[in-house]
Image (cartoon, rainbow, N blue to C red):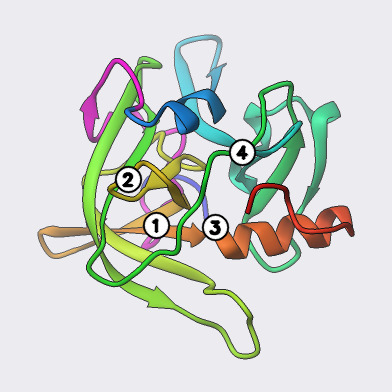
Amino acid sequence: MTGCALALLILTGCTTSSGLAVKAIASPYVAAAYIPLHKRTHLGIDSANGAAVAIAPGMAVTVAPNANLVDPRSVAGSARDYDLLFFRTRTGGGPPISVVQMGMAVTAYGQGRDGELRLAHGTVRGVHTCPGCTASAYFTFTGNAGPGFSGGPVLDGQGRLVGITFGYRDIGSQRMIYAYDMNRVDEELRRVLKGPAAPNR
């Protein structure tokens, strides 16, 4: 699921910026955990942008299509059934998380075409489960997130991390953003590391 013309789009590598340019992430905990991803492509003429978030001491998450934006030597593993990629980082421990709920107002962050931080506000429209899962598979929210938001954080109204953005779909005049629930991200990290639950959860 890459490129700029698919029904469900991964939010990297396209040529325009979405959301609003901002100078900083409002939540200091998420700001400290946020990792911008950037790479020049096509002889330096074009660029690919995405984001990642440190979710445990020395460990960060992004989405698998961002693998080309991450040092391959730092990769710890990827989720078997989800588009999640975990890699080692010197960025500190993870920010506080919260449970996503229907109707919740959320804020997503990502990188713009020129590498600037961008923000998109939205409202949760669906929380989607999977058979036999102990955590939601993903949730959807309306908003103006777009290229460069892939792998970036989704926050609740108190600045707590509720999800990781992975794609979008335009339905008529409305854009629906897709994000992995943080409880799902934590479960997948435990599977990759085959260890105990991530700290501070």
Q: Disc 1 residue type?
A: Leu
Residue labelled with disc 3 = 182
Give the magenta part as a residue range: 5-25
Sequence-wise, the earlier of marks 2 and 4 is 4
Q: Residue furthest top?
A: 44
Q: Name the mark nearer the viewer: 4 or 1.
A: 4
Element carrying mark 3: helix
Q: Which residue is mark 1?
A: 6
User: How many tags in the picture?
Assistant: 4
In three-dimensional space, the C-alpha distance between marks 4 and 1, rounded to whole angstroms, equals 32 Å
Labels 2, 1: front one: 2
* Three-letter code for the amino acid on which mark 4 is drawn: Gly
- What is the x, y in percent for residue 32? 52, 24
Secondary structure under the numbered disc 2 in the rendered image: loop
Which is nearer the N-term, disc 2 or disc 3? 2
Determine the main secondary structure of the stretch shown in magenta: loop
Is label 1 or label 3 in front? Answer: 3
Q: CA–CA distance between discs 4 and 3?
A: 11 Å
Tell me the tag on residue 94. 4
Gap in Å between the C-alphas at discs 2 and 3? 15 Å
* Circle 2 or circle 3, nearest the eye: 2
| Residue 10 is one of the magenta-drawn residues | yes
**Label 2 – label 4 distance at C-alpha:** 16 Å
Residue 158 — which label? 2
Q: Secondary structure at mark 1?
A: loop
